[in-house]
Image: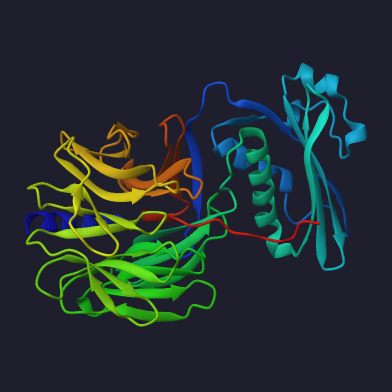
């Protein structure tokens, strides 16, 4: 039970450090890739009844690419011209500025919709690489800008972009009006904009997990002074209690097909792993051991589950078939390895690795068994992969505040994500890819 007591203590410390409702986020790049690709994103042309467009599409795209750490967007003040069409491009000027890629576009108000056109050019080859047109309502403008960023990112790097995704995170804060601590679960765009309150409570909330369609969150709430697992639709706010058994109900994790939830339950006397079929509520027990088994995470193909257990004496990572069977130990390096999560390609596991009293985010290569430590801060926790596998978001501390952070899987790109107001953020979960079918 010592391991479980340590887990509870970490959870409680995390939540007691944590921000509140409608808490937006600010992202700072603390480390980027040397030799980031030079790119110019020219302010989009605008035609509409107002003097300025409702959203600066080019600025959103430029911010996305800059935050990736892989691009170095040119400052607008350094631009020698601002073309809106391919025929207006003077490639020589852009080459003189050291720009290898150029993004231009136009935005037009058409009734209640906005038509956005963009083009990406290779400056050295003087050739268009890609171009699309979109028609969307005003509320979708930021989302379309992120989608354009994804297209540019994939065209220039060969890897799918993840700018058009969302993240969930938990905050807590003592309200000055009544001196009561409130906990809250939020979702926001990955650039920190459009924060949405999912639920707020005087009782701790933890362990958010996205459904694969991006519509629902499963999470743990300590309402009525006991842990219970809930499932909530983030669009309709419809909420359903999933597990409220005697003892611990914790660590929900959606299966890749969205039909099952893995969870940790102690209803039979000890913390074990179970799989629940969401439609029927039927339970299947996966583990049976006197040790503490918790923190399950599904493999992308749904065939295996990794989890944390102290059955070897110290917290380590194990793997078991999602249909049950004998668990296999995966980590042997270090005295503490916990909170595992699979990469989208199933080749890596991100985890919290404790060494010399410090807890860092690490990545385990499953084929080789090689472990790489990615972070250097003192108390890192709750890693979650981006859906394209390029970045890992996690929780940490900075200047005595709980903040979120992100690191690339090779450790070269580092970001810090802090609340815009007093309070701290914890337990991030990166959501799945979103799809918008507005291309023309």
Residue 319 visible in the snapshot: yes
What residue appears at the point 10 percent right and 62 percent down from the top-left corner?
Answer: 289
Image location of residue 329, percent across then percent down: 19, 46
Give the quarter of the image for residue 50.
bottom right
Color encoding of the figure: rainbow
Residue reaching furthest top? 96
Residue shown at 72% from the left, 53% from the top? 55
Q: Is residue 164 above or below residue 289?
A: above
Judge whether 84 appears above or below 125 on screen: below
Q: Taking the image as drawn, is residue 62 in sight?
A: no
What is the x, y in percent for residue 296? 28, 58
Q: Position of residue 198 (x, y in %)?
A: 46, 70
Using the image as rendered, state which of residue 15 and residue 308 is in the foreground: 308
Nearer-the-camera pick, 143 or 210: 210
Q: Give the residue furthest to the right.
A: 87
Front one among 131 and 330: 330
Q: Is residue 250 left or right of residue 240?
A: left
Taking 306 as reference, is 389 left or right? right
Query: Residue at 55% across / 49% down in the picture?
Result: 191
Q: How many marks?
A: 0
Q: Which residue is painted at 68% across and 40% down in the image?
A: 152
Position of residue 159 relative to residue 296, above or below, is above
Q: Is residue 209 left or right of residue 378?
A: right
Q: Measuring from the top left, give residue 87's x and y in whole percent.
A: 93, 34
């Amino acid at each position: 039970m010592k391991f479980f007591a340590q887990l509870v203590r970490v959870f409680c410390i995390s939540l007691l450090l944590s921000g509140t409702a409608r808490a937006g986020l600010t992202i700072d790049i603390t480390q980027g890739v040397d030799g980031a690709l030079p790119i110019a994103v020219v302010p989009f042309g605008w035609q509409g009844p107002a003097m300025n467009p409702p959203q600066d599409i080019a600025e959103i795209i430029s911010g996305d690419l800059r935050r990736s750490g892989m691009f170095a967007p040119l400052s607008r003040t350094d631009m020698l011209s601002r073309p809106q069409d391919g025929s207006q491009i003077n490639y020589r000027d852009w080459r003189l500025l050291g720009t290898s890629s150029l993004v231009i576009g136009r935005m037009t108000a058409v009734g209640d919709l906005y038509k956005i056109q963009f083009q990406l050019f290779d400056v050295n080859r003087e050739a268009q690489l890609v171009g699309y047109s979109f028609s969307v309502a005003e509320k979708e403008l930021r989302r379309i800008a992120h989608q354009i960023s994804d297209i540019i990112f994939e065209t220039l790097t060969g890897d799918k972009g993840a700018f058009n995704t969302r993240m969930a995170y938990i905050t807590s804060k003592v309200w000055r009006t009544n001196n009561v601590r409130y906990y809250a679960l939020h979702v926001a765009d990955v650039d920190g904009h459009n924060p949405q309150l999912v639920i707020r409570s005087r009782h701790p909330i933890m362990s958010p997990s996205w459904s694969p369609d991006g519509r629902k969150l499963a999470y743990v709430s300590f309402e009525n002074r006991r842990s219970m697992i809930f499932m909530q639709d983030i669009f309709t706010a419809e909420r359903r209690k999933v597990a409220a058994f005697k003892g611990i109900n914790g660590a929900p994790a959606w299966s890749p097909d969205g039909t099952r939830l893995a969870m940790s339950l102690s209803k039979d006397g000890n913390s074990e792993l179970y799989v629940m079929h969401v439609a029927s509520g039927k339970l299947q027990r996966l583990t049976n051991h006197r040790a503490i088994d918790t923190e399950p995470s599904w493999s992308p193909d749904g065939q295996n589950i990794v989890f944390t257990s102290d059955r070897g004496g110290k917290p380590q990572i194990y793997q078991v078939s999602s249909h049950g069977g004998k668990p296999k130990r995966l980590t042997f390096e270090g005295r503490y390895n916990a909170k595992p999560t699979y990469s989208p390609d199933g080749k890596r596991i991100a985890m919290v690795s404790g060494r010399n009293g410090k807890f860092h985010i690490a990545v385990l290569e499953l084929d080789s068994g090689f472990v790489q430590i990615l972070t250097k801060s003192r108390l890192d926790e709750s890693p979650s992969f981006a859906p394209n596998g390029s970045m890992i978001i996690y929780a940490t501390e900075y200047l005595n505040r709980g903040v979120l952070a992100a690191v690339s899987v090779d450790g070269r790109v580092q970001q810090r994500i802090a609340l815009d107001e007093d309070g701290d953020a914890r337990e991030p979960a990166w959501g799945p890819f979103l799809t918008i079918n507005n291309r023309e």
